[in-house]
Amino acid sequence: MSAAQEFPVDLPGGPIGQEHGLRWTAIVLGVATLSLLLTNAISIESWGTDLPPSPGVARIVDDAGRWRAATESAGLSAPRATLHRGWKQLEEARWPGQPNDELAQR
């Protein structure tokens, strides 16, 4: 099957250069990173506490704790907290007649 048969619509303009795609990707990654840094600071702190103890890790955890406190006081952690509460409620949901201690047996 030829390319014309697979995609029969003519797109306006010439081919798009690769630098446009790289710029777009860099912008998307930058926005996503900044968004997560501002709204999900608790995960950075949690990640740090899972690492093997060392002076460097202690600094990461301390810095992440201060960053978490700053974002919480600014109200930036509210969207994540709301989603987390909803997720936990869904985890605890039971079918009618399902025993509550089923999770303890896993």
Image (spheres, grey):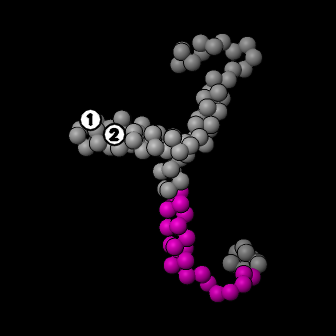
Res. 91 image quadrant: top right
Q: Nearer the viewer, residue 82 or 26?
A: 82
| Residue 84 visible, this angle | yes
Res. 4 image quadrant: bottom right
Q: Amino acid at mark 1?
A: Pro
Specify the label residue 62 is tagged with.
Answer: 2
Q: Which residue is mark 1?
A: 53
Q: Nearer the viewer, residue 9 or 94?
A: 94
| Residue 47 visible, this angle | no
Using the image, determine if residue 12 lies above or below residue 47. Answer: below
Residue 75 x, y percent position in the rendering: 56, 43
Magenta part of the chain: 10-32
Residue 24 x, y percent position in the rendering: 55, 70
Q: Does the magenta portion include 21?
A: yes
Instruction: State which mark lies toward you, 2 or 1.
Output: 2
Q: Residue furthest front?
A: 73
Disc 1 crowd rating (10 Å Cα; few below 14, some 14-19, many 20+) is few
Q: Earlier in the sequence, mark 2 or mark 1?
A: 1
Quadrant into which the N terminus falls: bottom right
